[in-house]
Image (cartoon, rainbow, N blue to C red):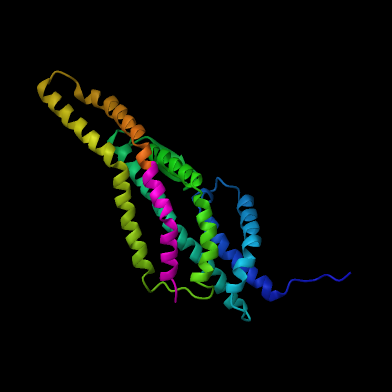
Amino acid sequence: MDIQLVPIEQFQAFLISTARVAGFIGAIPVFTGPQAPNQVKVALVFCCSLVLFPLMQGYIPEISFTPPTFIIFLVAEVLIGVIVGLTARLIFTAVEFGGTIIGFQMGFAAANVFDPQNQRQISLLSQFQNVFAIFIFLAIGGHFIFLNAAVESYRILPPGGIDLSGSAVPYLMELASHMFRLGIQFSAPVLAVLLLSGLILGILARTFPQGNVFLLSFPLNIGISFTVIGLTLNLVYITLSREFDDLPNRIFTLLSFLQP
């Protein structure tokens, strides 16, 4: 019985396609941490590559790959996925930044928990808002954005060329500055109420010196903060939905800046 072997050129093209798909899937926040088994990640990358390879094959150049050239191609493809994933990671970093500010102001500065996704200690409020952002990301189908971007990226940025000396790095810096503004937006309602609460408690401390306003401020600030957080969850959902809806435009803009 004759065994039909896959041509080496087609197999190399499949590996190049798999490298980019692996970079995009690895950029999805749900799969960035070690809580997702490696077997699941590998199986998902392989299955998505099999499905998307017929769409990507036409954009892969038909050249004779030597081992050094082939390795450079693979590294460049994974790097593209990692850079694109940074655009989504900045949104979740903004959420964690806002939660850290809120937790510090409401008296939870020492209440840290271990984040298995990033393998570090983060604020309790940061972990809560990070999980809330992931739920919103999955609820609106944000993970499909990366699969669609993986296919469209071959039309915008074919394999074999990536330029980091153009407008890509300044654009990433602009997104990073937007991250800080977004973090302030998340924490602004709670900070405004806590500022007003501190002003009122300061007036009470001057009016009733015999009262222990300092001990009263801890449960009062915590209760007020949780109340404001609960009342503004809908606003957080609207803000995150807007950011995730704009994510494809940011990805395609970044890919266009990476063109050589």
Q: Position of residue 111 (x, y in %)?
A: 37, 35
253 versus 142 height, above or below:
below
Q: Quadrant of residue 205?
A: top left
213 relative to 14 in the view: left or right: left
* Extreme residue in the top direction: 210
> Residue 244 colored magenta?
yes
Quick check: can you spot residue 32? no
Q: Nearer the viewer, residue 209 or 159?
A: 159
- Which residue sits at x=31%, y=33%? 228
- Which residue sits at x=14%, y=18%? 210
Position of the C terminus by quadrant: bottom left
- Which residue sits at x=39%, y=50%? 242
* Type of secondary structure dominating the magenta stretch: helix
- Which residue sits at x=50%, y=44%? 139
What range is drawn magenta here?
237-260
Quick check: can you spot residue 154? yes
